[in-house]
Image (cartoon, rainbow, N blue to C red):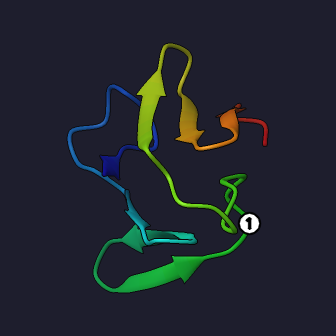
Amino acid sequence: WTLKHHLSDPEHAFMVVSFEDSTVVLSIGESVEELTDTGFLGSVKSILCGQVHGDAFVQVHPGGFRQILPSG
């Protein structure tokens, strides 16, 4: 999935990649770098990731869901 910093941004800033047993968040820009302090749960696969009103992110995984607020 690709996500923006803010819903109103014209370009995407993050790429979320899900594997069988993990999730990785990458920063997209002039270079692509792995991020570790995003609030996404990295130790599970993601079923769905998205952005909701107020610039919060949502991660759905087999054990539930996680809402990540802009403040962290």
The residue closer to the viewer here, 1 or 22, is 22
Query: In the shown orientation, is residue 69 left or right of residue 49?
Result: right
Residue drawn where x is 66% and y is 66% of the image: 42
Residue 21 horizontal/vertical position (percent): 57, 72
Residue drawn where x is 46% and y is 43% of the image: 5
Q: Which residue is mark 1?
A: 37
Residue 26 horizontal/vertical position (percent): 45, 72
The residue closer to the viewer here, 48 or 54, is 48
Residue drawn where x is 52% and y is 81% of the image: 34
Query: How many numbered discs, if any?
Result: 1
* Amino acid carrying mark 1 in the image: Asp
Q: Are there few (<14), some (14-19), or many (20+) residues within 10 Å of tag 1?
A: few
Residue 69 horizontal/vertical position (percent): 71, 31
Q: Secondary structure at mark 1?
A: loop
**Residue 30 position by quadrant:** bottom left
**Residue 35 position by quadrant:** bottom right
The residue closer to the viewer here, 61 or 28, is 61
Residue 31 horizontal/vertical position (percent): 33, 86
State whether residue 13 is above or below residue 57.
Answer: below
Residue drawn where x is 58% and y is 44% of the image: 61
Query: In the shown orientation, is residue 3 left or right of residue 20?
Result: left
Specify the farthest residue to the left: 10
Query: In the shown orientation, is residue 11 left or right of residue 21?
Result: left
Q: Split into 4 quadrants, where in the image is the C terminus? A: top right
State whether residue 56 is above or below residue 29.
Answer: above
State whether residue 16 is above or below residue 69.
Answer: below
**Residue 44 position by quadrant:** bottom right
Specify the farthest residue to the top: 53
